[in-house]
């Protein structure tokens, strides 16, 4: 048996030997997660829109266009009867009341061509309550533009969604920050002190996790006095959302805390004579933060959906505050939805934002912990 | 909430080494139970001596009780009692939190309609509703009645709470349980398929649907159903019965009518949990399929289908069952809001109204019953875990 | 001499990883003689387990068999190429656990934690023979007794977590042998065990092999174990075979510098007090990285060496 085989030399090693920092490694793993990367971009855009909503929105959230009440969305066009136009435009509506149903019916009128002007003058607004201006990203010259249609009062749905994004997206983050504080406080204390405190906190967390979230939220929200200012209600809702949200985070923080104390690299660091501060700062904190940031990212949807549900029921934020939940409150019964389905569009934004946060969280988790294949702490 | 990816929910749970990790407090865990009566000598004062003696006797008793190996189920059930007591306090406090009470909100209503109410009448009302008592007494009054099955009187509906709730709680249960069954029926096969055919087109499609399902608030889904129902089928969807059966007595036809209406709330409430469950099951199964014992089974000559179902599935189902318990709160919450949108005769809408009117007995009892429902679900899922995983049973 | 029960030729396996395609095996060829013990030795990562998995067709993505053949000649019936079997071929499922079975390194994880051991052993029978559950359990109990477990009434219904590592490994061995396979593959079956238990398990495998007369592929990185148990030795390094011979030939008179290195790195071979040699120091500047074809020598052994050394070896 002299079977002779000439195998190619095994190509091993070399390139693998270059050193990378943990951070670079994490970034590499994160980049592999395409969807997470896309989600980060989507969220970036959403938050930019929310930040500059006064500029981007063509109208203020309360501006009413009596010529277009319950009007359907308008399409941006480039082709007119006379051919292609580089400057995009919209067609204005002709309205007539259907004699049978008594409903307004709109048809685009080719005669009413409103070209888009960019950075042109429109509604007055005060950016961040600081800079008064009349500039808008785009306005329709000589007419009106309602990309997502209008509501019963003739208010521009597109503009209202942008203003709503500011409230809904920020309440998500604010709620998570508060949840974070509570979670780290309770989880950290439990993990640090251990013993009876740990047991008590554990038990408390277990009880809270077993509560029917929404009914309790409802109870708490019903407690918000009607007389409160919009800002106070905003903070009230944030606090309410956090009150039932922290147990998830606290449980994870505690788990991480306990696990980290036992980790070989922490013990090794200590044995090597690294100072207490150094162990905490160099080894424990980064590891701990990456997990907690991941958990926090995954908690934002919880907050956004909570706000939406409460406002939808009319016990969260209330008009004139504009949030995605408040906007959807307009679409509570099927008659309205059938007549003006575009009032459901805020819901689409909720779905996009929540999905993006979920995907981003997944990507962050994989980047922080390559061995975790999608499991929960 | 609802179906949000509560940061833990949609991910797999680690091996549930301890079934008592959540739900109720560990029944066999209370410190000191196992400690014997270690007594110091020479108690100095009489009272102290008495106290110590009592304590020692108490400890002895506890130790004796702890030595009786109660069946797991009984231990878990006993553990629920302090949890429920605590929950009832939370609920009472939360509902009493708003300034004012049922009398003020009734007065507001009366005065708005032009009725003059004298101070004396107000006092009478207060006394009638026990509102002049100390809050602790009010709490005891409420919970004492609750325990013996008398949930008090609803001021808003002017009817006993028991009647009001029994009318509706059945439907709440019906919808919640059918939503859970829907979750199981759909999530389990799809989760397995997704894991076994990882990275296939179907896997990607299912994952995408699950992601959207995870992000859609149940009420929005309900609204979409309303819209589609009208636009596509030309019927207004909503309610649990057609108008002609709404008040009719029970009959086969009425049951059939209920079933044709039931599937919409079932799907709407269950979709979020389905997405969560599917993803958990998929992640767990993928983890499990890599384990050496699966290779061992393959090396034994076990056929692929059996390989997945008999081995990893048995283990992947554990965390799945335990998260199922955690999903109950989400299902109950989802049901509450969906019933408002779909106009269902369940506890959701009633709860909202009762909360707004501060109808303590009604609102408190509804929330309390929902909490009990969830705890029972948790208990059931723990018992199932113990039944399915010998490691827990033997602990 | 009868035909070998397994004849492996030019086996090649690749793993797709993030950093590219890693060849795990290339041109692996050796025979497994019937009724004897063939040891595969080599350092960690040399491809021993992958070779064993190929024989059972257990290589899973991202791994893939890219070439070669594994000819299996059962006692009864026609020989066939394991590599060419379709995924759904019934012969594949007969082969696994029926004709060839495997004992794994980690007894702690190789058993399902949620099924009782009686059921797990019986299942191996039920996969291959059409007998009732009760009959299968009875046979399983017999086999378990044979590997040294007692009190079967009680033990059959117990779960793996109630057993020690050594006992679990006995269960795994019982599970592997319960269908009387023609080939038993042991992939480092003693590495995870205490030294005393190791010896017991080795004795068990050896005595069962004598009783049942099956062939054994014994994978290890411990040459001491090889001396105790093997008839033939295959030395692997970086996914290639460096040397094949009888246990006497290879251990007494290693031809390949790498094998010599392995031998001198065994504690106990070197007089006490002296430092153990590292493989690198023995190999010296001899080139063991470049692959060379396996060449058969007059005394039946095969070795993979550069042509110059080969000539010198062949002359002596
Ligand atoms: N799952 C895997 N993924 C990537 N590469 C693998 C995998 N399993 C084995 N390999 C490759 O095969 C080589 C041989 O592995 P193995 O046969 O397990 O070595 P050992 O001789 O220690 O049993 C490894 O060095 C590695 O490059
Ligand atoms: Mg190996």
Image (cartoon, helix red, strand yellow):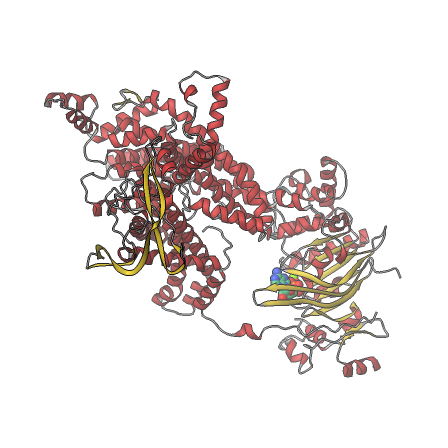
Ligand 2 resides in the quarter of the picture at bottom right
Q: Is residue A272 above or below residue B257?
A: below
Name the residue furthest front: A82
Front residue (pair A64, B177): A64
- In-image side of B6 versus C152 (left or right): left
Whether residue B235 is visible: yes
Whether residue B70 is visible: no
Name the residue furthest left: B119
Percent across and percent down for residue A155 are: 28, 45
Give the image quarter of residue B83. Answer: top left
Looking at the rendering, in which quadrant would you find the N terminus of chain A? bottom right
Q: Is residue B259 above or below residue A326?
A: above
Residue at left offset 74%, top offset 76%:
C292
Front residue (pair C204, C192): C192
Percent across and percent down for residue B31 are: 38, 41
Front residue (pair A312, B105): A312
Give the image quarter of residue B357. Answer: top left
Q: Is residue B330 above or below residue B200?
A: above
Percent across and percent down for residue A127 are: 23, 58
């Amino acid at each position: 048996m002299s079977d002779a085989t000439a195998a190619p030399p095994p190509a091993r090693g070399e390139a693998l030997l270059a050193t990378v920092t943990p951070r670079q490694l994490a970034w590499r793993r994160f980049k592999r997660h395409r969807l997470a990367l896309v989600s980060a971009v989507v969220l970036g855009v959403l938050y930019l829109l929310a930040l500059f909503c006064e500029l981007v929105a063509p109208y203020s959230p309360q501006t009413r266009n009596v010529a277009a009440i319950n009007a359907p969305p308008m399409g941006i066009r480039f082709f007119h009867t006379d051919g292609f136009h580089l400057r995009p435009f919209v067609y204005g509506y002709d309205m007539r009341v259907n004699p049978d149903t008594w409903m307004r019916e709109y048809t685009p009128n080719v005669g009413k061509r409103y070209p888009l002007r960019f950075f042109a003058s429109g509604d007055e607004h005060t950016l961040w309550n600081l800079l008064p201006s009349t500039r808008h990203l785009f306005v329709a010259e000589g007419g009106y533009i309602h990309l997502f249609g209008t509501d019963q009062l003739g208010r521009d749905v597109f503009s209202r969604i942008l203003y709503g994004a500011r409230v809904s997206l920020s309440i998500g983050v604010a709620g998570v920050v508060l949840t974070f504080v509570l979670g780290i406080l309770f989880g950290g204390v439990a993990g640090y002190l251990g013993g009876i405190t740990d047991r008590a906190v554990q038990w408390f967390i277990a009880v809270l996790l077993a509560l029917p979230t929404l009914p309790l939220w409802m109870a708490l929200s019903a407690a918000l006095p009607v007389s409160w200012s919009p800002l106070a209600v905003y903070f009230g809702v944030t606090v309410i959302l956090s009150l039932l949200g922290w147990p998830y985070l606290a449980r994870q923080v505690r788990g991480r805390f306990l696990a980290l104390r036992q980790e070989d690299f922490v013990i090794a660091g200590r044995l090597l004579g690294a100072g207490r501060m150094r162990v905490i700062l160099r080894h424990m904190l980064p590891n701990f933060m990456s997990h907690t940031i991941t958990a926090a990212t995954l908690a934002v949807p919880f907050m956004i959906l909570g706000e939406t549900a409460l406002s939808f029921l009319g016990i969260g934020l209330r008009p004139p505050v504009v949030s995605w939940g408040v906007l959807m409150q307009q679409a509570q019964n099927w008659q309205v939805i059938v007549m003006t389905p575009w009032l459901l569009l805020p819901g689409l934004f909720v779905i996009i934002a929540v999905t993006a946060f979920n995907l981003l969280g997944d990507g962050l988790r994989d980047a922080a912990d390559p061995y975790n294949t999608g499991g929960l702490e | 909430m609802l179906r949000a990816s509560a940061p833990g929910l949609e991910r797999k749970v680690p091996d549930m080494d301890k079934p008592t990790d959540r739900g109720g407090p560990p029944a066999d865990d209370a410190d000191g139970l196992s400690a014997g009566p270690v007594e110091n000598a020479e108690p100095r004062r009489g009272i102290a001596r008495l106290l110590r003696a009592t304590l020692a006797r108490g400890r002895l008793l506890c130790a004796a009780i702890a030595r009786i190996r109660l069946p797991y189920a009984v231990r878990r059930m006993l553990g629920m009692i302090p949890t429920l007591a605590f929950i009832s306090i939370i609920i009472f406090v939360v509902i009493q939190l708003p300034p004012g009470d049922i009398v003020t909100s009734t007065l507001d209503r009366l005065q708005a309609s032009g009725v003059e109410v004298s101070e004396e009448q107000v006092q009478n009302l207060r006394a009638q509703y026990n509102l002049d008592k100390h809050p602790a007494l009010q709490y005891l009054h409420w919970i004492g009645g609750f325990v013996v099955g008398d949930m008090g009187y609803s001021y808003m509906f002017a009817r006993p709470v028991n009647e009001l709730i029994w009318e509706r709680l059945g439907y709440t249960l019906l919808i919640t349980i059918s939503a859970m069954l829907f979750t199981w029926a759909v999530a389990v096969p799809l989760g397995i398929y997704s894991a076994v055919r990882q990275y296939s087109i179907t896997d990607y499609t299912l994952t995408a649907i699950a992601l959207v399902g995870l992000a859609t608030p149940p009420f929005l889904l309900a609204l979409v159903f309303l819209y589609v129902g009208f636009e596509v089928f030309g019927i207004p969807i909503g309610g649990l019965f057609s108008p002609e059966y709404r008040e009719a007595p029970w009959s086969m036809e009425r049951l059939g009518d209920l079933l044709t209406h039931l599937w919409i709330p079932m799907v709407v409430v269950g979709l979020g949990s389905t997405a969560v469950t599917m993803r958990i099951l998929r992640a767990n199964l993928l983890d499990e399929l890599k384990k050496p014992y699966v290779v061992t089974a393959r090396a034994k000559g076990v056929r692929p289908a059996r390989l997945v179902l008999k081995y990893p599935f048995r283990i992947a189902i554990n965390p799945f069952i335990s998260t199922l318990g955690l999903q109950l709160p989400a299902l109950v919450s989802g049901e509450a809001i969906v019933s408002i949108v779909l106009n269902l005769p369940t506890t959701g809408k009633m709860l909202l109204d009762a909360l707004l009117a501060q109808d303590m007995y009604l609102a408190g009892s509804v929330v309390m019953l929902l909490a009990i429902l969830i705890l029972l679900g948790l208990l059931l899922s723990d018992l199932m875990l113990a039944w399915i995983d010998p490691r827990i049973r033997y602990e | 001499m009868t035909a070998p029960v397994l004849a492996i030729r030019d086996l090649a396996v690749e793993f797709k990883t993030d950093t590219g395609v890693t060849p795990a095996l290339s041109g692996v060829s050796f025979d497994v003689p019937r009724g004897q013990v063939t040891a595969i030795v080599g350092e960690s990562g040399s491809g021993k387990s992958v070779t064993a998995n190929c024989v059972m067709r257990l290589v899973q993505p991202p791994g893939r068999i890219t070439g070669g053949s594994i000819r299996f000649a059962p006692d009864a019936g026609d020989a066939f190429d394991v590599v060419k079997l379709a995924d759904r071929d019934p012969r594949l499922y007969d082969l696994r656990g029926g004709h060839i079975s495997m004992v794994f390194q980690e007894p702690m994880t190789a058993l399902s934690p949620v099924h009782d051991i009686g059921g797990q052993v019986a299942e191996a029978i039920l996969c291959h023979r059409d007998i009732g559950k009760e009959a299968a359990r009875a046979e399983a109990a017999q086999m378990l007794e044979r590997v040294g477990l007692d009190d079967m009434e009680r033990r059959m219904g117990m779960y793996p977590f109630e057993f020690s590592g050594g006992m679990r490994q006995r269960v795994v061995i019982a599970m592997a042998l319960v269908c009387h396979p023609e080939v038993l593959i042991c992939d480092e079956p003693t590495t995870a065990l205490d030294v005393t238990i190791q010896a017991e398990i080795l004795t068990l495998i050896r005595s069962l092999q004598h009783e049942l007369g099956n062939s054994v592929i014994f994978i290890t990185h411990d040459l001491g174990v090889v001396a105790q148990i093997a008839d033939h030795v295959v030395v692997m390094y970086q996914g290639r075979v460096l040397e094949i011979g009888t246990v006497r030939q290879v251990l007494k008179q290693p031809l390949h510098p790498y094998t010599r290195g392995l031998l001198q790195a065994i504690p106990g071979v070197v007089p006490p007090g002296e430092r153990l040699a590292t493989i690198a120091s023995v190999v010296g500047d001899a080139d063991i990285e470049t692959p060379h074809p396996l060449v058969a020598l007059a005394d039946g052994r095969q070795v993979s060496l550069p042509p110059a050394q080969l000539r010198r070896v062949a002359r002596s």
